[in-house]
Structures are given as structure tokens and as C-alpha cells.
Amino acid sequence: MIGLFLGDTDFSEIVLKKIKKLNIKYFIIDFSKNNKFNKDKNSHRISIGRFGEIINLIKEKKSKKVLFAGKIAKPKFASLKLDLKGFYYMPSVIKAAKLGDAAIIKAIIKILDNENIKVISSIFFNPELAVKTGNYTKLKPNLDDISSIQKGIVYFNKLNSLDHVQAVIVKENTILASEDRHGTKKMLSKLKKKSRGILIKLPKKKQDLRMDLPTIGLNTLRDCKKYGLKGIVLKSKKNIFLDKSKCITFANKNKIFINVI
């Protein structure tokens, strides 16, 4: 029995679909904004402040492992109804919230660790969503591109593990834009058309790789075309790559490279 903490984005639905295909017993704690898993008979809607109820459910199901998939938004703490364990643990979550959404999930993982509940990688059942080192398109980065990519990697390595940045745009050894809590799409919208930049999406240096992995999909490629990007750079086995074959076909058609380092 696996416990699934599911939030928004298509990734959570992909994980659930794979678990069903593998005939693995599961239950859901639905953290999505609009309760999108409410039609699933194994789904439970529990407030993030009711840690006692969450932990009791996990133990009742005799589950030793859980995973997080999909975006879990920052809750409105003032409106949360807390149970006893909620009162005990919530101060650490509120403190973490000041550092960003990723810090909230880290705080929850620490709470689960305290309760002897193991959190596994979000792609544990979907290893096919990760990619290995190599160039996946007909077009490859040239020497100038490689120099710019290296500049972007140096930038990532200087980041704090709780920063929001999981993506930057580089061009000619210059950082054109960096992601904030509003995500990659918002960052790209600030670019000029035909920017000829390179999108680098990497996990932060000390990021907890069990959750919140940088993700790309067909919508990302469409945005890259819209703003005239030359290519995308990912990290081997540390990115989630949705609709892989469709993305590669689209990239080849629009002369965009996909490079995994």
C-alpha cells in the first residue's frame, strides 16, 4: 500500500495512472486546489493542518511509504483547522513557508520522518519520465551554446537549496532571466520574441530529489518556440520529462535542441 500526496499539474495524474496500471494498492491525500481526485474511491481530502488525521490514515492503511506528486500550493494558514498534531507541528511549517513552497514540502517530509513514514522519490514508479545524458534532437548545441550552458550551471550551483529558481535563460554567457515562485511560463513571458536564448531547467544543488523535480512537457516546447529559444538543457535522471516522444518530434520540427547533461 502506497500513500499518494497529490497536488495540481498533469504529473500527479500520470503517477496515479501508472500505479493503477501496476495494480499497486494505494490511497490518495488530495492536496489539489479544486479536489480533482474526488471521484476516486481511494481519495481523501484532508487539510494540511490536520497532521494527526493524515498520520492516522497512513498508519490505518498500514503504509510505510508515501510519495509527493504535483504542485502543492501554499495554504492559507489563518483559515486552517488544526488537530492536536497540527498544533504541535504547524509552527515548523509556517516558519518554512517564509522560505518558499519547496520548504513547506521539506517540512512535511521531516514531520513524516519523525513518525517513521518513509517518503520515496516522486518518479519511483515512473522511471521512464527521467532521461539519461545525451542529445535528443537533430540539432545540437554549438561551442558558444556550451559556454553559455556552463555559465548557467555555475549560477545554479551558487543558489540556496530553498530558492525558487529551477530554471534560467542564458544567452552569450549572460543570464537573461531566472525563474521565481510564479514558474517557468511566467519567466518566459518576459522575454522578447526571437530571444535565441537557452532554457536550463535543473534541480538546485542541495534539492531534495524525492519531490519537486524540474519538469518540462509539450507546453514548455511550445513556449520555447513562441519566444524563439534555441534549446533546452536538463539534468540526467533529475528532471521529469512529460510527453517525451511528442516533445522530441516538436523540437526537431522547430529546430530546438534538447540536451541532457
Image (spheres, rainbow, N blue to C red):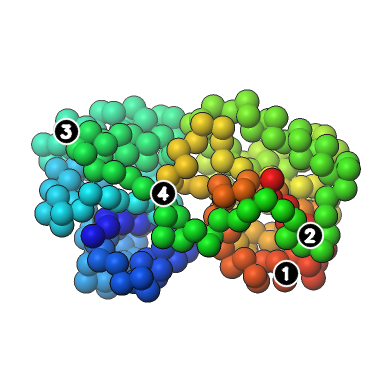
- First in sequence: mark 4 vs mark 1: 4
Q: Where residue 139 appears, x then y in whole percent?
A: 83, 59
Q: Nearer the viewer, mark 4 or mark 3?
A: 4
Q: Residue 208: percent from the left, percent from the top?
A: 45, 38
Which amino acid type corresponds to the residue marked 2 in the rendered image?
Ile
What secondary structure is found at the residue carrying circle 2?
loop
Between circles 2 and 3, the one closer to the viewer is 2
Tell me how far mark 1 sits from mark 2, CA to CA: 8 Å
Residue at image mark 4: 121
Which amino acid lies under the numbered mark 1 shown in the image of this protein? Phe
**Identity, as a three-letter code, of the amino acid under mark 4:** Ser
What secondary structure is found at the residue carrying circle 1?
helix
Q: CA distance from mark 2 to mark 3?
A: 50 Å
**Does residue 152 appear to the left or right of 73 in the view shown?**
right
Instruction: Kindly identify which residue carries mark 1.
Output: 250
Point out the tag, 4 or 3, that comes first from the N-terminus: 3
Residue at image point 36% right, 70% down: 22
Q: On residue 256, which mark appears?
A: 2
Q: Of callouts 3 and 1, which one flags the residue occurring earlier in the amino acid sequence?
A: 3
Name the residue that disc number 3 marks. 87
